[in-house]
Image: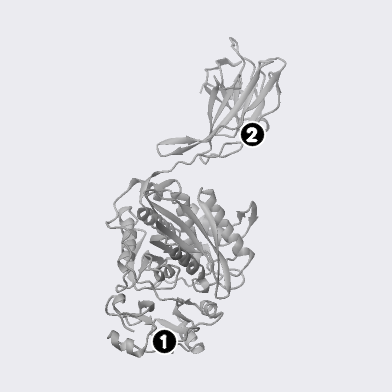
Amino acid sequence: MEVDRPLGQLGLPVFAHFGDGNGCEVALVVATRGELVAAGVPFQILDTYLPEVRYLLATERRPGVRRAVLERYVPLLDDGRYLLLHARAGLVEELQALGMASWRLPDTPLSLREPVTPLAAPVAYDPLVASMLAQVEQGAVLTYARQLSGAEAVTVGGSSYTISRRQTNSGVPIDKATQYVAEHLQRQGLSASYHPWSASGYSGRNVSGLLPGGEHAGEVVLVTAHLDDMPATGTAPGADDNASGSVAVMVAAEVMHAYTFDRTLQFVFFTGEEQGLLGSGAYAASLAAAGTNVVAVVNLDMIAYDTVDGPVLELHTRASQNPGYAADRAIADAFRDVVTVYGLGAALEPTVVADGIPYSDHAQFWNRGFPAILGIEDTAHDFNAQYHKVTDTVENLNPAYFTAFVRAAVGTVAHLAGPTGIACTAPAAPELTAPAGASSGTPYLVSWTATSADGTYVLEEARESTFATPSSFALAATAAAFLHASGGDTFHYRVRAVEACGGGSVASEWSLPAAVPLEGGGGCELEVADRTISGAEVFLSCGELSAGPDLLVASSGAATLRAASVMILRNGVRVTEGGYLAAGTDSALAEP
């Protein structure tokens, strides 16, 4: 039936609501003829309703396939844009393989509640959001896309694996793909979990990561994408559809985990999208059943292809007569504001399309009455010809457009969640390794595991196990060589990792200490070679010296020397306490 008023005023159960090929808003309802007449709007009876019968809608995605589909299938409705068909097992994948997008109508009527608008005011510049966008790098975006599409191997469960396909029913490949994104979320310090589902003869698992909010933690913002892909069998890179959207969710989690937000964030990857939005349907239903207050969903599906007519992107909302339209529109307007406020206008041209298009996972949230938008590339005038083909590879994407789209999505989600500050998570304590003993006058190596993202560490050396009066060294390395002429002494070591956070830094706990007792006596002759120091700094302390020791540097050696006390080398170079001296060959020694 045609819709010329708010849906709630029809007084009928609505199972779908969208803009048809004639530019009209239409609704699919279940009602008697008398109820249809009483509604007072034009209608057409399509089928005799039976509770056990299911329906699906389909629309052309690959240009030119509509005629072939009509030759093979007889629709209940053809409005010039959508086809309504009786659903049966396997029909969704048949249509997808032909180049049609299709989805099943829900078993229960749409929720027609009017949600709260997620943002009541236009987006204003926020330095926290600006710092997030600055961290979205094209290199990382493309690397993740190559990894998800099988162009590069990934590490999953500690082993190398190539994700050559991600079909929902592919078994090991989709299990590895979901494990890969789950481990990515865990590396960001997020609470990651799997969400198994079964529907319409298929089964799979979604993956989500949780970033708890602050004052309004009960309000939830989702950024979502489907991870599964097509073709239905064999190799399926799915770089644009939909490694691209999944990459955006990965990058959003990677960037945003280091910040705090007023609202709770969920980063979600769905499977079963290509079989009719199955994974997202189960996920949205579980949120509704739990009474979760979802205030915004940003769903990203195919966001990396752009070749003609400018960098257009589409932001799809529900149609205007739907009571959820205003809340959807607020999300879309926030996206457009982010593009303008953060200087992305040259790279992106967002346009809002209020057509209620239901061919991606956002539609399952609309069905439950949650505010949502679909962010997608220009499908109207610049459709990706590699859609659902083995040629949907990274080489066919537009890197600059892709990266800008990810930046805009991160900024939109950040503003919807309400940034409140920077969250500093301390790195893990390194594991320290030192020899059980050493000889006076002989160099020895102290090393530790890498746990700092910045590659920065603080190492302490002390003669007492309490570290009451330690010598402290800030290092950009994971090893240091020491040389002492102090037979009978014991030197104690501990190390901690340091990372930048905002205008300061955050440090790990100290490692477990290690003790190195020295035996014998001797001078301070040292041969520094690559094989000896492995890129470490070398610290020399030979007591109180009025005349320096011999220092020999092999011709192939390279080291940085630092004096723990005043030291005079044999060529008369003086190194003050804590000072540095770069050494290549012996003749290259000079004042720092």
- Dot 1 lies on which element? strand
Residue 138, position as x, y percentages in the image: 46, 53
As measured in the structure, the alpha-carbon distance from the residue carrying label 2 to the one carrying label 1 is 72 Å
Pointer 2: what residue? 534
Q: Nearer the viewer, residue 103 or 133?
A: 103
State the image coordinates of residue 504 (x, y, percent, origin top left): 42, 35
Above/below status of 226 relative to 91: above
Q: Which residue is mark 1?
A: 77
If you read the primary sequence from the N terminus, does the residue marked by circle 2 or circle 1 appear first? 1
**Is residue 160 shown above or below 283?**
above
Q: Which image quarter holds the N terminus?
A: bottom left
Left or right, 128 with reference to 512? left
Secondary structure under the numbered disc 2 in the rendered image? loop
Q: Which tag is nearer the camera, tag 2 or tag 1?
A: 1
Q: Is residue 151 visible?
A: no
In the displayed structure, 352 sits above or below 424; it is below
